[in-house]
Amino acid sequence: MSEQDELAALDAELAAFERRTTEVAARRTPSALDEKRAAVAAAKRKAEDAEQIEQLEKRYGKLGERLASASTPLGMLVVQKPMRQAFKEFTDAIHPVKGVSFEDSRLFVERCLVFLDRAKFLEIVNEFPGAVVPLANALQKLGGAVESDVAGKS
């Protein structure tokens, strides 16, 4: 095989791999219809979450003052300002070296949960455990902890 023939064969092979890559990318790229459906679903959920927050604010107080929320792909979670006993038990559980355990944070959030129900909360935490952290931090702030105290017990 001459060098010209080998170059031509390599060019053909390269073109075939590039076509395959383009085809895979095209299959992975959502269609305009899929993108529009996703946008509508996101807007619907955002509106429903806003309506839910409005109802919860009537009962518990303002978001950021008495309530905190976190959105996940499985739904929004809302917690209320912790009662003294829940706050005390949480802060007492903070280890001076290790800090806060995930389980203590989860229990703290669960005790202050006002939306969604416990079963849905546990489903969300199993799928997205990171949702607990911002809610636990927000609860500490709602409970009166200053920013330097939120990071850990001194």
Image: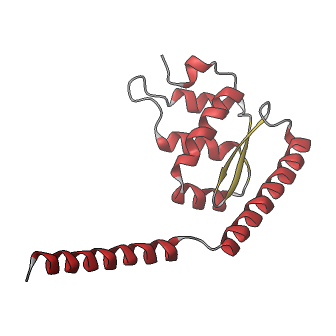
Q: Is the residue 21 above or below the residue 73 in the image?
A: below
Q: Position of residue 36 (x, y in %)?
A: 73, 68
Q: Quadrant of residue 83?
A: top right
- Number of numbered markers: 0
Q: Residue furthest right?
A: 58
Q: At x 69% / y 22%, what residue is drawn?
A: 144
The one nearer the camera, 131 or 6, is 6
Residue at 33% across, 76% down? 15
Which residue: 52% across, 40% down?
Answer: 104
Q: Is residue 66 above or below residue 31?
A: above
Left or right relative to 50: residue 31: left
In this orientation, which residue lies closer to the viewer: 111 or 152? 152
Residue 75 placed where, x, y %?
Answer: 69, 58
In this rendering, position of residue 54 left or right of residue 151: right
Of the 4 image quadrants, the one containing the N terminus is bottom left
Q: Residue furthest left?
A: 1
**Compared to 152, does 101 lie above or below?**
below
x, y percent for residue 96: 42, 22
Q: How is the image coloured?
A: secondary structure
Residue 18 position within the rendered picture, expressed as x and y whole percent measured from the top left: 36, 73
Residue 133 occupies quadrant = top right
Most foreground residue, 102 or 27: 27
| Residue under the point 79% across and 53% down | 49
